[in-house]
Amino acid sequence: MPDHVARPADNYSPLYFLASLGAGGITVTFFMFLMFWVPHPGQPVPVFGDIATAFANGGLAMQTAIVAALAGIGAFAFLNLKSLVWNLRAFAAFRRTEDYRRLRTTNAETTLLAMPLALAMSINVGFILGLVFVPGLWTVVEYLFPAAMVAFLLVGVLAFRQIGDFLGRVLSEGGVFDVTANNSFAQLLPAFALSMVGVGFAAPAAMSGTTLTVGTSLVLSTFFGVTAALYAAIAAIIAFNSMLQHGTAKEAGPTLMVVVPIMTVLGILFLRQEHGLHTAFGAEENPGETLVFLARLLTVQIVFFALGLVVLLRQGYFADFVIGPRTSPGSYALVCPAVALSVMGQFFINKGLVGAGVVTQFSAGYWALTAVALVAQVVAIALVLRLNRQHFTPAARAAVPAE
């Protein structure tokens, strides 16, 4: 009989928080079905009552979409939270090891930012679950926004403490940051975490009817969003110089696409702020400007996605770490761009093209474009299922034949 050995995930890395993040991102992709296909008059997002009404009055296509959305949200939200709990327990044990202390002395210290990144995503997932499955939640939502902002603030403080530990060490001591090992976009992970906190802070700006709540949301989301953009720009420039000299580190290759999810998260942040400025402060919304704004973000995403894909294919990354025998926790970073392109595609089509009157909703052209976003969603789902099977299934070692 084969001898069972430990799962790859038992060799813990903080990057396994990306497994929770990926499942949470897929939850958001299913929420897009409800967001853009279910009518929700009276509030900016669909809630339980809107979904029930649409299911009761809609045709087979609408009912099918709603069932798929609810099933997808339920399944991947469960996977998101299950993975988060597993990571928190594994990380608590990891902190007592020599590997953790060694990690805190290397460039890889920034992988710790995967924790606040995943925590912020799970808060967003929790809000989606409440909107979709809890009747009457919208009647008390104004009380929930301050609580949500406190939760995001705690996660933001955690992120800044970790960033402060890292930058304080490398900028004060000197010579401890290995520039030759900075040949990837791994150092953009802190910017990703800050942007995820920022987009969470921006949610009340888009949904609250209280001026104080909207104003607080606008200020705090701006702080985290701008900080994330600054950090990403500086880290990307430094890293690109190292990649030109030393090539891209193969195991960190997926980080070349981290700009894609950062653009989606910051794009949603700015859209939420724009809506809040319109509803609370009377600022004018221009559909044409929104279309161009989303087109610019999508262009940046396509450029970095193509760059990452070229490098990963040249290095044979997929053959080794996705469909091959090797495993790397950094492989979960591949889920993020697929999720991000799916979500940004939905926003570009619905808020951009449909909003500006370029495309008619539910027309043939509309579904042709939406199919691209759905393909990206399917890729993300396939990656999560495949990587979970690779990393969380015990490996088996063949028994040595008897003499």
Image: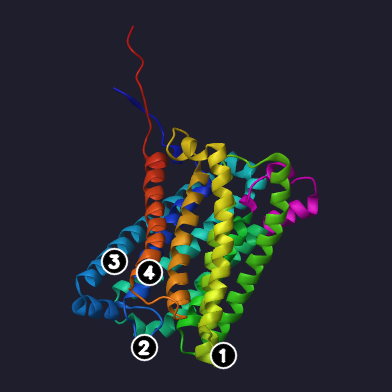
* 14 with respect to 178 (left or right): left
* 300 with respect to 90 (left or right): right
The residue mark sitting in front, 1 or 3, is 1
The disc at residue 42 is 2
Mark 1: few, some, or many residues within 10 Å (few <14, many ≥20)? Answer: few
Where is residue 94? Give x, y as percent. Answer: 52, 45
Q: Give the residue at mark 4.
A: 365
Q: Residue at x 73, y 49 (%)?
A: 241
Q: CA distance from mark 4 to mark 3?
A: 26 Å
Type of the residue with mark 3:
Leu
Which tag, 1 or 3, sits closer to the chain's start? Answer: 3
Mark 2: few, some, or many residues within 10 Å (few <14, many ≥20)? Answer: few
Q: CA distance from mark 1 to mark 3?
A: 35 Å
Q: Is residue 281 above or below residue 303?
A: below
Which tag, 1 or 2, sits closer to the chain's start? Answer: 2
- Pick whichever, 109 or 93, lies toward us: 109
- Helix, strand or loop for disc 4: helix
The residue mark sitting in front, 1 or 4, is 4
Q: Give the residue at mark 3.
A: 70
- Helix, strand or loop for disc 1: loop
Which tag, 1 or 4, sits closer to the chain's start? Answer: 1
**Disc 1 + disc 2, Cβ < 8 Å:** no
Can the viewer see residue 104? no
The residue mark sitting in front, 4 or 3, is 4
* 66 with respect to 156 (left or right): left
Part of the protein shown in magenta: 164-187
